[in-house]
Image: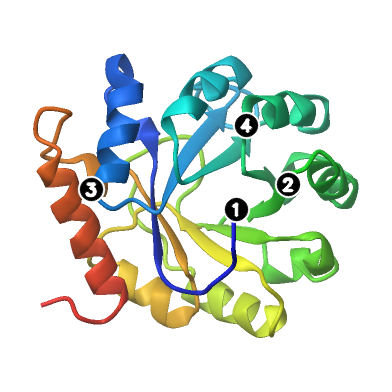
Amino acid sequence: MSFDRQIKIAPSILSADFANFGQEIQAIEAQGADWVHVDVMDGHFVPNLTFGPMAVKAFRPHVKTVMDVHLMIAPVDPYIDAYADAGADVLTAHVEAGPHIHRTLQAIRGAGMKAGVALNPGTPAEAVAHLLDLTDLICVMTVNPGFGGQKFIDMTGKIRALRDMIGDRPIHIEIDGGVDPKTAPLVAEAGADVLVAGSAVFKGGSVDNPEAYGENIRNIRAAANGVWT
C-alpha cells in the first residue's frame, strides 16, 4: 500500500450485516470505500466481543483494498502472527493495552504488516512521541472503545498535536468513533486522513440496496474535503 494524505474512508464492518460479511465488504468497496476496517474486541480490554483471527482470515478474500485491523485486545503480542497469517495489511494495537508497545510495534512490522498505534480519549498525544519511527498509523479514538454508534468526542486538539509531531513522516492519522458528515470536516481540518465510519456508512443500505452505502461514503468524503453543502 502506497502512502498519501488524501482522505480515505474506512467503513467499519462492525456495523455490517453479520450474516453477509462477504457481500457487505464487496458492496462497500464497489461503492467507494478506500479501506475496510475490522474492529477486534476481546471482552476484556473493552466491554464487547467481536472477531478473531479466523473471522479476519475469512474476510480477507473479499477485501480488494486495504484490510485495516484494529485490535482492542490485551495482550496483543501472542496474536500478532495469527493476524499476519489472516492477511491484515495494517494491524493497530492500543498504547494502553500493554507495558511494551515499542516491542509490539516492532513485532507487527517484523510480521510484514503496517504498524498502527491507537490512543484512547484519555491518553495524550505525547504517549506516542517516542514511537513515531516504528509507526505507520496513529488511530485517535473519538469515542471510548468497545461499542459502535457512540457520540463523537472532540479530539481535534490532540489531532493537531499529532500532526505537528509527525512532521513529514509518512504516518496516517486515523479517526475512529462518531465520524459522519458533521464531524468529518472537524477532524480532517485538524490533520486526519483516514476516517473510520460504521453506522454513518451502513445506515439505510443493504447488500440489496448498496447505493445507500455509496451516497453515505460520498457525503462523508465531501464533508471532509470541505465541499459538503
Where residue 107 is drawn, which disc sits there?
A: none
For label 2, the residue is 96
SS for callout 2: helix
Gap in Å between the C-alphas at discs 4 and 2?
Answer: 24 Å
For label 3, the residue is 31
Q: Residue at the spot x=57%, y=32% of the render?
A: 46
SS for callout 1: loop
Q: Is residue 76 something that shows in the picture?
A: yes
Q: Residue at the spot x=22%, y=40% of the render?
A: 202
CB within 8 Å, label 1 to label 2: yes
Gap in Å between the C-alphas at discs 3 and 2?
Answer: 35 Å
> Position of 185 compared to 182: left or right?
right
For label 4, the residue is 87
Gap in Å between the C-alphas at discs 1 and 2?
Answer: 8 Å
Q: Amino acid at mark 1?
A: Asn
Q: Is residue 163 above or below residue 11?
A: below
CB within 8 Å, label 3 to label 2: no
Gap in Å between the C-alphas at discs 4 and 3?
Answer: 22 Å
The quarter of the displayed image where residue 52 is located: top right
Q: Amino acid at mark 3?
A: Gln
> Position of 164 compared to 12: left or right?
right
> Where in the figure is residue 166, as x and y percent of width and height?
69, 78
Please give the count of numbered marks on the rendered protein: 4
Q: Amino acid at mark 4?
A: Gly
Instruction: Between label 4 and label 2, give the one nearer the viewer.
Output: 4
> Position of 111 compared to 142: left or right?
right
Where residue 120 is drawn, which disc sits there?
A: 1
> Position of 137 compared to 183: left or right?
right
Q: How many neighbours does mark 1 have within 10 angstroms: few (below 14), some (14-19), or many (20 or more)?
A: some
